[in-house]
Image (cartoon, rainbow, N blue to C red):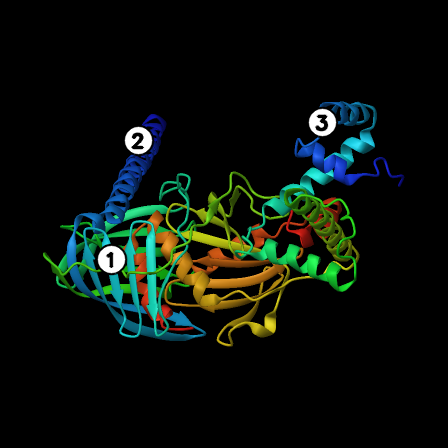
Amino acid sequence: MSRRALLCACVGVLAAAGLSGLFDRAGADASSAEAVHMIERMRDAPSALRFAATVRVTWRDRGATNDMVVHVTDDMGVLEVDSGAARVFDRGTHTYFKNELGWSSALVEPDRGASPSPDHRWRLAVSRGQPIAGRPTQLVEAVRADGTPAQRLFLDTQTGMVLRREVLDGRGRVQRSLEFVDLTLGAVSAPQAPSGVTTHEATALPSVPSGYEAPRAVAGYVLVAQSRHPNGVEFVYSDGMFAASVLEQRGDLDWDALPAHGTATDVEGTRARRYSDASADVVMFEHDGTVFTLVTDAPPDSVATLVDGLTPDRGTAEQVVDFVLGPFGWN
Amino acid sequence: MSEPFADHDELSAYLDDELDPNERAEVERRLAESPALRAELEDVRTARDAMRGLPTREAPAGFWDAVIAGVRDADVAAGRDGVEAAPVMGLDARRRRLRRMGVFAGAAAAAAAIIAVVLLPGRTSVRPNVTAVATQHAASSSDLGDSISSLAPVGPLVGRR
């Protein structure tokens, strides 16, 4: 082969590779934009549908997999979950829970700031999913930087609602999931709100109160709300895909009073107690005279980075101010 | 610390606009001259506002009549009946004086409590409720995102205490 022919061949190969990369990138961008649109549609779907369904919930806790079946009824966004022993009723910002003691209400949270886009932290991809509850689905995968999936959403092709959700750890194991076993679309008997239940509201805070730790962004999560609760200050973070609530309370954690089913652990050098439940991981730890209770539905590897980011070293002056003002609740 | 103004009643009366014009002018003159007095005025104002923030209760019907009758009976029993009565403070003035005494007693108690806390800064023992924080998170997450994903898994939790 002549030198000129060799040069042309090389240029051709490089051009082809470049064009291929360009098309791949364009394809990935298109897929990510489509995934974002599908996730937004999924979030709006319950407000536009009426259905009754049976849903299987699974979660891993201390090496064992637990599961439970619940019945879900939705009437244009008014939702009821019935697990037999307990019920949940949700309408707008009001959520009520019922156990053997009767109904109680969740705190009504103030309006939040804008959450990041679902592709803010995750690479998203769309592909054809397997049928769930006899219905065709599309699969939206959120993928870590190392290529492992963190979440799989199987979305109903017709309605856009989620029919199966899996949250996976860094080794590809499903940490928690929900899956529709059956689904009946159409008229349902509308869930009824409980009566006579007192509702309380959390108080919105315009800024982070002095003496509390709440970085604007941590481990890819963005602070979207801060509010005062009756027992502390709560900060809500979102990475667009998952949410993390952090309740901070001044004082010392009473380790002995915590429920027994947790796991004593060390998260990034911080002593912690961890609980893995059906809906979220709950992690409790102390830092500089404050008790942190972190709750998140994110994969387990995100928990470690969140804990690390929430516990920066503080200056001596700040600690002195907290020591003096802490007992008065002025900080 | 020196006492910049001995009569707290007068400061309290000043705040309540109960002084005559001459007394009021005298207080304002001293306030203008003395930063310590102005600070004391603020203390009195703070304590007064705190007391007024407390819920009020009406005395039962006939209470004040019973008090006056009781005082009269005591005078009779002590053989002072017929003796020229000492000047008696009006009920409103008596209530104001009682209220001022209450203000200063309350302020003193608050100061003592603050000093005790400063000298002995106790730590609060925190016992988070795992189920409560998890259900609260699910409720608030349902506002942010997909309510089905947030709330369907909460069912198994709610039954737990």
Q: Nearer the viewer, mark 3 or mark 1?
A: 3
Q: Which mark is residue A126?
A: none
Q: Chain of mark 2?
A: A
Q: Which quadrant holds the N terminus of chain A?
A: top left
Q: Count neighbours of disc 2 (C-alpha within 10 A) and say few if under 14, some if 14 to 19, many if 20 or more.
A: few
Q: Nearer the viewer, mark 3 or mark 2?
A: 3
Quarter of the image for residue A187 reads bottom left
Mark 3, secondary structure of its residue:
loop
Residue type, label 2: Gly
Q: Can see residue B33?
A: yes
Q: Count neighbours of disc 3 (C-alpha within 10 A) and say few if under 14, some if 14 to 19, many if 20 or more.
A: few
Reading the image, the residue beneath label 3 is: B20
Residue type, label 3: Asp
Vertical placement of A257 versus B58: above or below? below
Vertical placement of A138 versus A282: above or below? above
Mark 2, secondary structure of its residue:
helix
List x then y, in percent, for residue A135. Answer: 13, 59
Q: Chain of mark 1?
A: A
Q: Are marks 2 and 1 on the same chain?
A: yes
List x then y, in percent, for residue A24. Answer: 30, 39
Vertical placement of A148 versus A22: above or below? below
Residue shown at the point (79%, 61%) measured from the top left? B79
Q: Which mark is residue A79?
A: 1
Q: Residue furthest front?
A: B82
Reading the image, the residue beneath label 2 is: A12
Q: Nearer the viewer, mark 2 or mark 1?
A: 1
